[in-house]
Amino acid sequence: MIGLPYYLVVGSILFGIGAFGTVTRRNAIAVLLSVELMLNAANLNFLAFWRFLTPAAMEPHLFVLIGLTVAAAEAAIGLAIVLNVYREYGTVNLDQIAELRG
Amino acid sequence: MRPGVLIFWLLAVPMVACALLVITSRNPLRSALFLVAHMLLLAGMFLSLSAQYVAAVQVVVYAGAIMVLFVFVIMLLNLGGAQKMDAAGLGWALGIAMSLGLAALFVGTGVWKSGLHAGKATAKTLAQGGTAQAVGFALFDPELPWLFPFEVASIVLLMAAVGAIVLAKRKL
Amino acid sequence: MTIPNISFGPFDLVAVAPYVALGLMLATVLLAVPVLTWFERVTLGLIHDRLGPNRVGPRGLLQPIADGIKLFFKEDILPSNVDRRIFYLAPAISMMPPLVAAALIPLGDFRVDMGGGQTRPLTLVAADINVGILWVLGLASLQVYGLILGGWSSNNKYSLLGALRSSAQAISYELALSLGVLMAVLMSHSMSLVQIVQSQTGGIMHWNILGLFPFGLVAAGVYAIAAVAETNRAPFDLPEAESELVAGYQTEYSSMKFAIFFMSEYAAVVIGSCVAVVLWLGGWDPIHPVLGFIPGPLWFAGKVLLLIFAFVWVRSTLPRFRYDQLMRFGWMRLLPVALVALMLAAAMSAYRTDPSAGSRIPPKPEKPKPLMGGTQSL
């Protein structure tokens, strides 16, 4: 029987992968994609806890739905910023966008 | 092997593989496509957790809207080619250490707190499970406090839409 | 309609019905392509007052087969500097969503005679899931990937422009499509395609297109326009506008890969028409209960054919939009109309629904136990 820990392990692995991508990738779009991976891992955990621990409560679904909304907003704003950065600097490499470094 | 177990592994293994490919592909478009595949598999896993409504929303919103936007921007900036854009040396080591630490922490906490074979949901409570109807009744019940966050979420979306237009449009 | 419970070896009719429905729908979607190309060309010929295909076979009926043979034996060209894997994957991706959506379309409702004077209801559908219409919307939004990837991987400026246009168009018109669908959900109180059809039983006056008059009509119109735009058919065929972009995203495709793009467009037309019939035209419901002796699936097929004819009719009548017109129409006409109609329809529906009378709204489930402030603990 597949129990709660299996889902938690999968969620943790996904979150770790996302965190790794966020830290190491220098392409702004790849970083945004990694953030989406972490959000997804969190959603998986919400639903796993709901299914195995509190099947009578609907709140996990609402958290996931509102998380989805925030992810959509974040993607729209993030991509608009990336678009502006590309117009300004001609690159989306986060290491080359360092004007304030002096 | 029981079908539930088989389905779990059939979903989980490709899902993690897709996630790895998302962060290792040099080509941003490939990354985005692997993320789409990952989202679809994740929707399958939501279904196996009997959260039908959220699974469908995952496909519509994530795979159908957000990822199309990503692919659109990647194509617009013509970032398709392979690009060597990674942190090296220390950053890489730090990344591995951090992600392994986080994963170990989460696994440890979850398994320790819940026990290896914790809580099995009964068929009765799951029958009304994650249907659109159940989610809707919970979301719009005036006696529950979720109506206000729902409205706030719509304001967040409106702000994001206006903000994105202001940011992306060269002249208003 | 009551039918006997025929048995096939160890299985009876009730057990095989989902597979029958799936087989019927898949055969329809795949066979629709040759039949529809012929139908479209004959109809276009009729409307343009010319002959149309008449060389191969009687009335040109074998023309699609000749075309198919031609496409099979064409050279399969791989342009230089393309992203080969994505180039191969794109036609397959564009063909996948209509085939998956075929499993959700309900074809008919029967009563099966189980023997001993007992009957039980049987719906001819492969998969009746309670968020069916959401899955259809999700699949519709996945179809755009085939076009985008095909155009992008071709490494050709016309293809890329076609792909950019198609993705922008799909995102824009998906909103209107969803709002139109939402109005049908509002009228039928369900997201399951089977229940949506069952809520419209009883002749044309009960169909959603006349429900909450006049908002059913408005919603059906919005859905129809958005569906034509989603399938990239004229007058919304800007991704492949031949006078501007050669052939848009499919410029570099040849042989069977081109044929699969072609097939996916027709398959999307068939699925779009089927969903429209389910949502607005009562599915398998006869136009008047008196005509109930004609089997439901025949009614369904007839309505779908009518809508497909409308697709062809629109193509032959209306000129293509300009790109800015397309965007302005989608965002500044269609979307506001759909939004206002949805709000008014919701108000009307709430006003009309009397909770004490026999309403169609399903009973409220057991109250969920709140997490916050409760005593639930890990």
Image (tube, coloured by chain):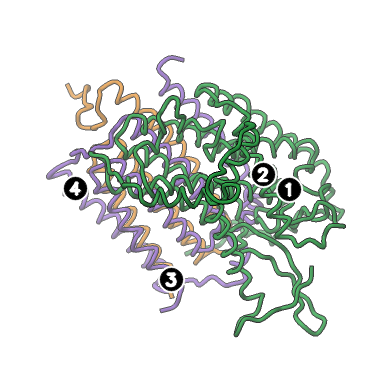
Of badges 4 and 1, nearer the viewer stands 1
The residue identified by callout 2 is C307
Question: In the displayed structure, would residue C169 be above or below residue C26?
Answer: above
- Decide: few, some or many residues near mark 2? Use Cα within 10 Å; few <14, some 14-19, many ≥20: many
Crowding around mark 4 (Cα neighbors within 10 Å: few <14, some 14 to 19, many 20+) is some
**Are labels 4 and 1 assigned to the same chain?**
no
* Left or right position of C19 against C209: left
Which residue lies under the disc numbered 4? B94
Label 1 chain ID: C
The answer to which quarter of the image holds residue A28 is: top left
* Sooner in the amino-acid sequence: mark 1 or mark 2: 1
Residue at position x 22%, y 48% from top? Answer: B95
Q: Which residue is mark 1?
A: C281
According to the rendering, which colour does chain C have?
A: green
Q: Colour of chain A?
A: orange
Per the image, label 2 sits on a secondary structure element best described as: helix
Per the rendering, the mark at residue C79 is: none
Q: Are marks 2 and 4 on the same chain?
A: no
